Image: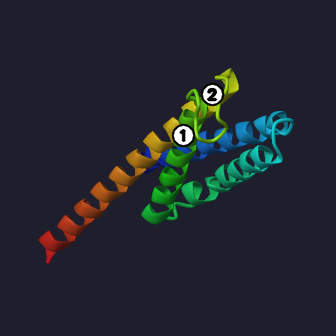
Amino acid sequence: MVAQKINILYYAAAATIAIAGILHLIQAPSVLEFSLNFFIFFSVAGIAQIFWVVPMIRKWGRPWYLIGIGGTIVLIILYVISRMPANPLTGRGGPVSPLGLAIELFQAAFIGLSIAIIIYESKRKQLSGRTASETS
């Protein structure tokens, strides 16, 4: 039963990053009028986030979780920078939309869940290593 509850962490992380990716893909056509580069950026970010469901569900391990966390942090930083007045990306602050805030919320949830998974897996390794050494 405990393993089943722990699997929920992996599924929840996969769901949050998938939703963020889908929302990025939904947002991509609306930025096309501003720039093809923005359209490509949102499309690539969305596809990458949807792909990240696979490492989470299949439990590929810490390197994959850390890469996912790092990439998501970069996306959040870019969002924050792009909303600042006179930002270095566009020269003006972008609007804060409900869709944009939803994306950031799901990305933050993904980061939190991924960190919880890393902590869980680290503690599990420590416990399994400790019990193996105690029986030797």
Query: Residue drawn 55% across and 30% down?
Result: 105
Q: Residues within 10 Å of mark 2 (few under 14, many from 20)?
A: some
Give the amino acid type for the residue marked by disc 2 in the picture. Answer: Gly
Query: Residue drawn 44% across and 40% down?
Result: 112
Q: Residues within 10 Å of mark 1 (few under 14, many from 20)?
A: some
User: Between marks 2 and 1, how big is the CA–CA gap?
Assistant: 15 Å
Q: Position of residue 67 (x, y in %)?
A: 50, 59
Number of numbered discs overlaid on the protein picture = 2
Please give the residue where the numbered disc 1 appears in the rendered image. 76
Give the amino acid type for the residue marked by disc 1 in the picture. Answer: Ile
Choose between 116 and 133: the one closer to the eye: 116
Foreground label between 2 and 1: 2
Please give the residue where the numbered disc 2 appears in the rendered image. 93
Q: How is the image coloured?
A: rainbow
Query: Residue drawn 64% across and 23% down?
Result: 96
Q: In this picture, is 107 found above or below 50?
A: above
Q: Earlier in the sequence, mark 2 or mark 1?
A: 1
